[in-house]
Image (tube, coloured by chain):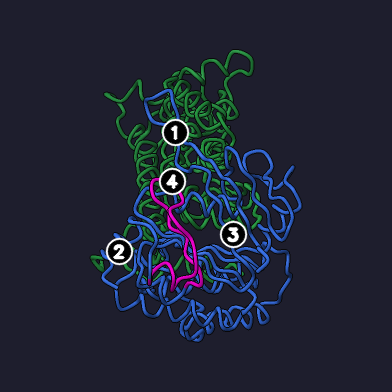
């Protein structure tokens, strides 16, 4: 499968508080995701999962290594801004959606669901009448498993955790991106709502068969039901990668075996 | 896709709160008196009467006369215009300065935020009176000096107080998401950060308006406020306070007006803070929620 987003030989360090030397969080890691594919990046806390995926989507710069999107190099402008950035960076920004861990932190508390979900359309420069916006937003909410009639005028404070996360997912897909990054989308959600989120993500994949999905998670139960391929990270090192059945069914590395055993799959 | 009906509901939401009701009544009266004084006062402002100085309230002079025999009520009515202008201009100018500084403080540009914080922390230690004295040297005592001094002092204060809430909003995932989607820093600041600090801003700006009324009185008393002959509540206080032991009523009236106005502005801030909080339009102050 041709890679839609590819990161090669990524090295990343962060300044360490109170120390002159920097802390290395990624050691020569490579990853890719193709159109229509779901890649799950798993590992323990501090393994570098979020950092790797943020670099893949151009949200952070790597110290060394390169990222490409649809064959174009992804190079951010100064300070991660659009001016001075490469065509690949601009295209990736335009054609990607984000789902964060905490749904309430990812929705402006003063904006209604309609306004929040429609924001990516506004930022993409699509001039829609209110009626058209309601229609597009309603479609996205339905795909995420929500009834738009009850939702459009609500504020985030009037939503449950599961509803808020599905609104965040609807927001991520409303502009029909080619790639979505979901960073621990279920870790701040109660167990019953996780099934709803999982169903929503699977429904979105079915509705958008060419969309690539990158999921960061430490929940192997979720990964098992969602991902086509898994990348295992441990302390910034790539442990193993491969199809979901292979990695979870017959892990080649001890660390992966420990993760699988801990998850009691 | 903003919801203008929310703003239209604001007066009703304020009226539902006891503090808001008091503030709206007093501020409404203030506005009405200022408007009426443009066309009519019980006595001409320049009318003096050396034979009837420091007179007690009477039918001709409902609040008495001052040391020149001028009608106290007429001067207070005319003074309400000056104080209204000072309060309004202070709110606008200190709000603009405060927002500019908050924008620099939460900027993602390397160094700009920390430099602005350091500058604000250094300048905030300068008292309003000292700023007014410095401005008086080149410009002379005037309404502009009071507005300038108050705007600088309160703008710095506003920036410092609003910074934590602004930082919280600016570092929120919804801002990160908007920026990742191609939003400019200006878009994120005006659409996400500022609306989320409106409750803090409203309290601080109304307190600033109230404090500007007090500052006008204090600065005029010190001789660096409004010029001689310009009616203001501070002017009325300054000309009568020396005789407080002999003619206490002439000090009571401007003092009472200043107190009523300042309390109304402070309570308006509380009511705005409550009404503009998320869900505040539907909530009553006495709901206990």
Q: Dots 4 and 1: beta carbons under 8 Å?
A: no
B141 or B42, which lies in front?
A: B141
Quarter of the rendering occupied by the N terminus of chain B = bottom right
Q: Is residue B129 found left or right of A210 in the rendered image?
A: left
Q: CA distance from mark 3 to mark 1?
A: 50 Å
Q: CA distance from mark 2 to mark 1?
A: 27 Å
Q: Dots 3 and 2: beta carbons under 8 Å?
A: no
Marking on residue A32: 3
Image colour for chain A is blue
Residue at position x 36%, y 33% in the image: B250
Q: CA distance from mark 3 to mark 2?
A: 54 Å
Q: Which residue is mark 1?
A: B157
Q: Which residue is mark 4?
A: A236
Most extreme residue toward the top is B137
Image colour for chain B is green
Instruction: Tell us which disc is closer to us: 4 or 1.
Output: 4
Give the residues drawn in magenta, as a range: A227-249
Picture quadrant of residue A138: bottom right
Q: Position of residue B122 (x, y in %)?
A: 45, 20
């Amino acid at each position: 499968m041709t890679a839609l987003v590819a990161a090669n030989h990524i090295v990343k360090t962060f300044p360490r508080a109170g120390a002159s030397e920097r802390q290395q969080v990624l050691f020569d890691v490579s990853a890719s995701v193709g159109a229509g594919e779901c890649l799950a990046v798993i590992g323990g806390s501090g393994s570098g999962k979020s950092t790797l995926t943020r670099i893949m989507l151009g949200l952070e710069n790597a110290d060394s290594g390169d990222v490409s999107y649809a064959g174009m190099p992804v190079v951010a402008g100064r300070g991660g801004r659009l001016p001075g950035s490469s065509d690949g960076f601009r295209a990736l920004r335009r054609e990607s959606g984000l789902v964060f861990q905490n749904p309430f932190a990812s929705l402006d508390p003063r904006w209604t669901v309609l306004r929040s979900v429609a924001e990516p359309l506004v930022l993409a420069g699509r001039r829609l009448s209110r009626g058209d916006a309601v229609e597009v937003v309603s479609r996205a909410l339905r795909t995420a498993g929500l009834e738009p009639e009850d939702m459009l005028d609500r504020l985030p404070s009037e939503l449950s955790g599961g509803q808020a996360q599905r609104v965040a997912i609807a927001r991520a897909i409303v502009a029909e991106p080619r790639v979505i990054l979901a960073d621990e989308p279920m870790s701040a959600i109660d167990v019953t709502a996780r099934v709803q989120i999982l169903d929503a993500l699977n429904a979105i994949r079915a509705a958008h068969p060419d969309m690539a999905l990158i999921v960061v998670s430490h929940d192997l139960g979720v990964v098992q039901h969602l991902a086509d391929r898994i990348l295992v990270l441990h302390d910034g090192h790539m442990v193993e990668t491969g199809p979901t059945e292979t990695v979870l069914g017959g892990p080649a590395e001890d660390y992966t075996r420990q993760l699988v055993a801990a998850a009691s799959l | 896709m903003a919801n203008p009906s929310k703003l239209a509901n604001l007066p009703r939401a304020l009226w539902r709160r006891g503090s808001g009701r008091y503030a709206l009544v007093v501020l409404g009266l203030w506005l009405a008196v200022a408007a009426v004084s443009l066309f009519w006062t019980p006595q001409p402002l320049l009318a003096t009467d050396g034979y009837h100085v420091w007179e007690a309230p009477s039918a001709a002079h409902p609040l008495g006369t001052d040391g020149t025999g001028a009608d106290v009520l007429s001067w207070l009515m005319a003074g309400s215009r000056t104080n209204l202008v000072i309060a309004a201009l202070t709110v606008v100018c200190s709000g603009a300065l405060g927002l500019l500084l908050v924008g620099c403080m939460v900027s993602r540009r390397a160094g700009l935020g920390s430099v602005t914080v350091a500058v604000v922390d250094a300048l905030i230690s300068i008292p309003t009176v000292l700023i007014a004295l410095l401005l008086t040297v080149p410009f002379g005592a005037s309404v502009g000096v009071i507005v300038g001094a108050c705007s600088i002092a309160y703008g710095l204060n506003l920036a410092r107080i609003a910074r934590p809430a602004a930082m919280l909003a600016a570092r929120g995932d919804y801002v990160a998401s908007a920026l990742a989607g191609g939003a400019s820093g200006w878009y994120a600041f005006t659409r996400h950060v500022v609306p989320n600090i409106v409750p803090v801003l409203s309290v601080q700006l109304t307190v600033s308006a109230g404090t500007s009324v007090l500052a006008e009185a204090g600065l005029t008393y010190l001789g660096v406020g409004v010029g001689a002959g310009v009616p203001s509540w501070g002017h009325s206080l300054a000309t009568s306070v020396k005789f407080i032991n002999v003619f206490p009523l002439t000090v009571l009236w401007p003092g009472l007006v200043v107190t009523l106005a300042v309390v109304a502005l402070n309570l308006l801030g509380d009511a705005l803070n409550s009404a503009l909080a998320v869900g505040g339009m539907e909530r009553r102050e006495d709901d206990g929620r």
